[in-house]
Amino acid sequence: MEKAYDLVIRGGSVVDGKGSAPFEADVAVKDGVIAAVGKIAGAGIEEIEARGKMVSPGFVDIHTHYDGQATWDERMQPSSWHGVTTVVMGNCGVGFAPCKPGDHDRLIRLMEGVEDIPFPVLAEGLPWNWESYPDYLDSLATRHFDVDVCSQLPHAALRVFVMGERGVNREPATESDIHAMAAIAKRAMDAGAIGFGTSRTLNHRSSDGSPIATLTAGEDELTGIAMGMAAAGNGAGKGVLQVVSDFNDPQAEFDMLQRIVAKSERPLSFSLLQSPRDPEQWRDMLARLSAAKAVGLQMRAQVATRPVGVLFGLELTVNPFSSHPSYREIKSLPLAERVARLRDPGFRSRLLSEEADNARSPGLSPARAWDRIYPMGDDNPDYEPTPDHSIAAIAAERGLDPYSVALDHMLDGGEGHGRGMLYLPLLNYAQNSLDPAYQMLQHDCVVPGLSDGGAHVGMICDGSFPTTNIIHWTRDRTRGSKLPVEMMIKAQCRETAKTVGLFDRGLIARGYRADLNVIDYPRLKLKAPSVAYDLPTGGRRLIQRAEGYTATIVAGQVTYRDGEPTDALPGRLVRGAQSAPMAMAAE
């Protein structure tokens, strides 16, 4: 007898992405979309028993950097380990198209510097079977993934493509340059770009130390590109704008972005984090967003939902001894040999007696940071730690030097063998609390973002943000208020999808994409970050897994069961904005 549905999820607690309270229901899937929600009599070819478990839409992560990984890998891990079913890459203005053959190394060095992806990995992994941005999309369109992939036109690549060395040197764009960039932006949007990303922060530098080419791009250049996007779709306009900025002059910078949005009618989002340099500036930015919304402008902030911090370790890019002369003697040795030397009493004593050559080394000036550096636990890592758990506090309690405590943790933590990690929260944690993030998350112009999945492979491991959003903010937080689970699901499913124009997903309702998660909510937890050597050339990267995802489903096919991948790869390149199902178009 023919089954009525391809898949039926039975009896789960449905959190539908609308912000509604959870309700018990079955969810039926047919031909990659949700066919029915409620009490379903018809059988599925496959059925998942979900009683006692939460059923949510798949998570939509709009701030990733899988631009390279998507060209050589089928699995967008770590994101797909964390319930993510759609990723958006090309953020922060970095990427690999358009690109002339002579500029390959230049764009690789930029990605290496900005996103900490090693040059050999990219040089070996990238096929470079494109030159134009539409060619890059065509290359991606031939591939199958475990998530849907959306791409943004990266400003740095665009600027170098049009201006060459002048663009790299951050010279002002001429009228002719702007016209050329606008034309390419229009073609990119018509070819299927989801948007355009740019960077205006000094934190983004090439691996040679030079600032990103887009840092000082003028308002005329940004407006011209946005107007190229507005001309796409036969003048209807296509694509969203994504910006990261230092906001050194908040009023002037925000006013410029507001003018660009008003003229181009393109939606815009920017990164918003609490900075230790100005811990209250985020309040002003939220007020500006509210004022922009009041006059009809589509502007949102992407916020991080835990501290953005750096991990230090003997396997990682840096550690507190990286600039010590004795450590430099052994830094090129295999890990096991380094660990043996570091355990040798004589070598250890010499190392601990030295001062770092670099005053910016972890734990040094301008103020010793040991009171802000924490041991990363081996399980259930704490992303809202208190100062009494810092390396400084542990050292004081034991009557030891902080360097000695840090070294012991790196040698003995992480299940030993020199794989222990230290955690330094840098942003969103100026007052040793996530209360600012809690307040940001409740603002109606804010969405969770900034996971940087696929990037910072030797220093940062934030692709697990979506799991933190669930376990920390709706269940486990002890140092302040929590948020309703239905609010967080809506935020990282429906609201993120809408922010980039994906109106066909993020809801559990008839006709929507069957991108779903079945979650053992009480058991959901994060594993500690660890290191894998699975990039091209055997390159190293930080990864982080989770427990408690019973199933992740993309386009109606189960891609992960209990955290392990299946053979299904239903994910594809998504070309541009997607309309809501006809029955729900008014939603």
Image (cartoon, grey):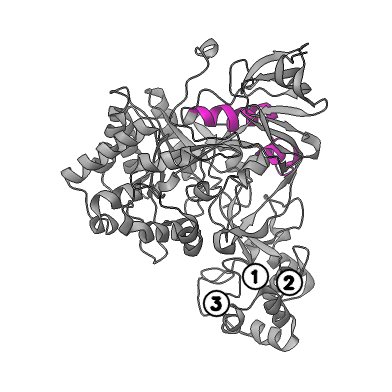
State the residue in front, 2 or 122. Answer: 2
The amino acid type found where label 1 is placed reads: Leu
Q: Are marks 2 and 1 in contact (CB under 8 Å)?
A: yes
Q: Mark 2 points at which residue?
A: 411
Residue positioned 58% across, 26% down in the render:
506
- Please tell me whether mark 1 sits on a helix, a strand or a loop: loop
Q: Mark 2 and mark 1: span between their CA atoms?
A: 8 Å
Q: Mark 1 and mark 3: span between their CA atoms?
A: 13 Å
State the residue in front, 72 or 243. Answer: 72
Q: Position of residue 204 (x, y in %)?
A: 42, 56
Q: Where is residue 42 in the image (x, y as percent from the top left)?
A: 76, 12
Q: What stretch is highlighted in magenta?
A: 469-498
For label 1, the crowd category at 10 Å Cα-Cα, with few meaning under 14, some 14 to 19 and many 20 or more, is many
Q: Mark 3 points at which residue?
A: 323
* Numbered marks: total: 3
Residue found at the very far bottom of the displayed protein: 346
Residue found at the very far front of the displayed protein: 1
Q: Which of marks 1 and 3 is nearer the N terminus?
A: 1
Mark number, residue 447: none
Q: Mark 1 points at which residue?
A: 314
